[in-house]
Image (cartoon, rainbow, N blue to C red):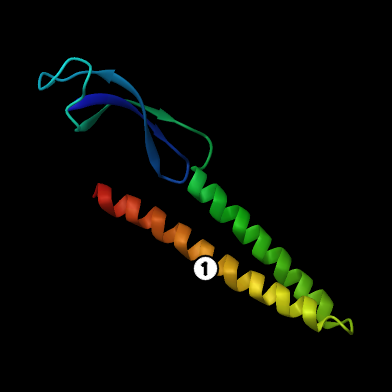
């Protein structure tokens, strides 16, 4: 049960920061026991990297949808619409994977 600093993001996720203190179950000099306890919590006014990546992909998806709506009013854009539709499908899969990753991390801690 070694002690670490913890950084809590605005989205509610957190990450472990610097090592602070060894516990009395230190097996060998310089090694930790493997259990992490919070010694100090710092609040960060930013979102975690996973949430940032999700937001970026959502913005990109909205931009593709906007392009499709614009291209539907123009002629000779069927190939562009098909490509943007494929891009949206791929972005949806990536967003879903990132949301699953975030959810797994929070479930593992419970």
Image x and y of residue 98, in percent: 47, 57
Quadrant, the N terminus: top left
Along the line of sight, the residue nearer the viewer: 19 or 42: 19
x 40%, y 60%: residue: 100
Residue 91 as seen in the image, left or right of residue 110: right
What residue is shown with label 1? 93
Against 92, is 2 above or below?
above
Q: In which quarter of the image is residue 28?
A: top left
Q: Nearer the viewer, residue 31 or 101?
A: 31
Q: Residue at x 41, y 27 (%)?
A: 42
Is 94 placed left or right of 70 in the picture? Answer: left
The residue shown at (46%, 62%) is 97
Q: Which residue lies furthest to the right in this view?
A: 75
Residues packed near mark 1 inside 10 Å, few (<14), some (14 to 19) or many (20 plus):
few
In this view, the residue in front, 57 or 13, is 57
Q: How many labels does the image show?
A: 1
Question: Is residue 101 depicted above or below 32 in this figure?
Answer: below
Name the quadrant containing residue 9: top left
Residue 18: x and y, percent? 36, 23
Mark 1 falls on what kind of element? helix
Q: Position of residue 77 (x, y in %)?
A: 84, 80
> Quick check: 80 left or right of 97?
right
The residue lying furthest to the top in this view is 29
Q: Is residue 10 above or below residue 29?
A: below
């Amino acid at each position: 049960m070694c002690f670490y600093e913890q950084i809590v993001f605005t989205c509610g996720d957190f990450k472990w920061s610097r090592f602070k203190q060894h516990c009395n179950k230190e097996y060998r000099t310089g090694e930790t026991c493997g259990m992490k306890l919070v010694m100090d919590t710092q609040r960060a006014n930013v979102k975690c990297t996973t949430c940032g990546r999700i937001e970026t992909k959502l913005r990109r998806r909205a931009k593709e949808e906007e392009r499709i709506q614009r291209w539907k009013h123009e002629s000779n854009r069927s190939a562009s619409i098909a490509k943007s539709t494929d891009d949206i499908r791929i972005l949806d899969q990536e967003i879903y994977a990132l949301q699953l990753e975030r959810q797994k991390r929070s479930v593992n801690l419970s």
